[in-house]
Amino acid sequence: MSQPPPASGAAPPPPGAPGASAPDGQPPAPAPVWELIHGVRRYWAVVAALDLGLFEALAHGPRDAAGLAEALGADPHRVGLLADTLVAMGLLTTPGLTTPDEGGPAGGAGRAAERGYALAPVAAHYLLAGARRSMATLVRTGPGPHERWPELADTLRRGGPRVRVEDDPGAFYPALARGTAPVQRAVATAIARELPVPAGPEPLVVDLGAGAAPWALAFLQAWPAARGLAVELPEVAHVTEEAAAASPSAGGRLTVLAGSYHQVELPEAAADVVVLGHVLRAEPRAGARQLVARAAATLRPGGVLVVADYPRPDRPTPAATPDLLMALTILATTGGQGAFSVDDLHGWMRDAGLEPGATHHPLPGQTVLTASRPAGHAAAGPLPRPPGSTVTLSTSWE
């Protein structure tokens, strides 16, 4: 069915744009819709592999389908199909497998049972539970509680989910805090290296909503003379304490304060850095603005506010998909706003007496905004960049 003609004076949509027909006048191929459907299947295939321990079973070397099935206590045919799917997704490899394009026969039903499977580099680095860069927990927790997604339409009509994560913080937030820590530690390390070391003898870093304390610990590692204060909900504070105890760089310099970051007593005008690491979008608008003001009041002259978040994109381009999906995740699972624009955040910073500084992108998809309290005659100043400038940092997970 052809598209209706454009309104008088309006240009037709460009090829490939929504509403555009293929060059021959036929409807576009449904590949994008199939990708949506397959995306659900891909996700649950990986979750199944994690739940079975499939990646761990291959951690010490390849196995054939029978050996893999035996290790997992599952049927060889079914395990083989899952493993083949993970090969197609680039998460496993098949050592020695040849295809017609490679000059050999493609593996049929008979050869499938003899096929060997091994971890692809991406799985070895990010999907093994014990790997330093592991995202295995994040795969499960990143989308939020899975049962909330089928209710999204009702949630949007209602103005909030039927059950919010914050209604029982101890049920979900500890796993989320552990799952997000490796990525956030890499981001925080890059930012801590970028900020100038404060001139005082004992800089203070305050981390509000610390989780597993990737931000506080990164600053303590970068600044050996610093001390830290990590604020976390009582139901989650044990995760913060465990992370501090396991970190050689903390050296007893991190104090964990259990309580709401809206209510606990904070030092006034004393902190060199205050971090709001991925907490604002889970707040309603008034709560987020109040939290920025509270963080600003904690900063000394010359101190820096660090806000890591996924701001609402100015334009909904394909590149903005991850940020927008993150916002929907918050709407589906919490009472938060989901996302705020950079203009919102900068406005709240200015209202709180801060000067917006540089915006950093330490890793793809990671945005960190900064603002500083005017230093006056303080010896150490904050970021020496004009407000609104953007910095792309080169960093790794090392």
Image: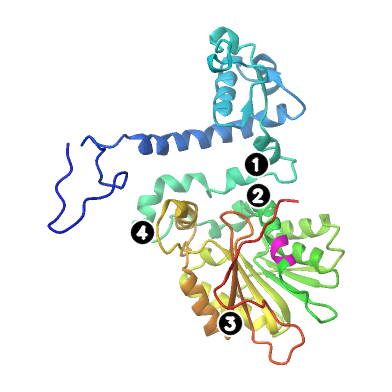
The magenta region covers: 189-193
Residue type of the residue flagged with mark 3? Glu
Residue type of the residue flagged with mark 1? Ala
Disc 1 to disc 4: CB gap under 8 Å: no
Whole-angstrom CA distance, mark 4 to mark 3, is 37 Å
Q: Name the residue: 38% across, 34% down.
A: 34
Residue type of the residue flagged with mark 2? Gly
Disc 2 to disc 4: CB gap under 8 Å: no
* Mark 1 or mark 4, whichever is nearer to me: 1
Residue position marked by numbered label 1 in the rendering: 136
Whole-angstrom CA distance, mark 3 to mark 2, is 33 Å
Q: Is residue 224 left or right of residue 277?
A: right
Q: Is residue 190 magenta?
A: yes
Q: Is residue 166 left or right of residue 243?
A: left
* Mark 3 or mark 2, whichever is nearer to me: 3
Q: Name the residue: 77% across, 76% down.
A: 204
Whole-angstrom CA distance, mark 1 to mark 3, is 38 Å
* Mark 1 or mark 3, whichever is nearer to me: 3
In the rendered image, the residue lying farthest to the left is: 8
Residue position marked by numbered label 4 in the rendering: 158
Residue position marked by numbered label 3 in the rendering: 355
Residue position marked by numbered label 2 in the rendering: 179
Quarter location, residue 252: bottom right
The 10 Å Cα crowd at callout 3, few under 14, some 14 to 19, many 20 or more, is many
Whole-angstrom CA distance, mark 2 to mark 4, is 29 Å
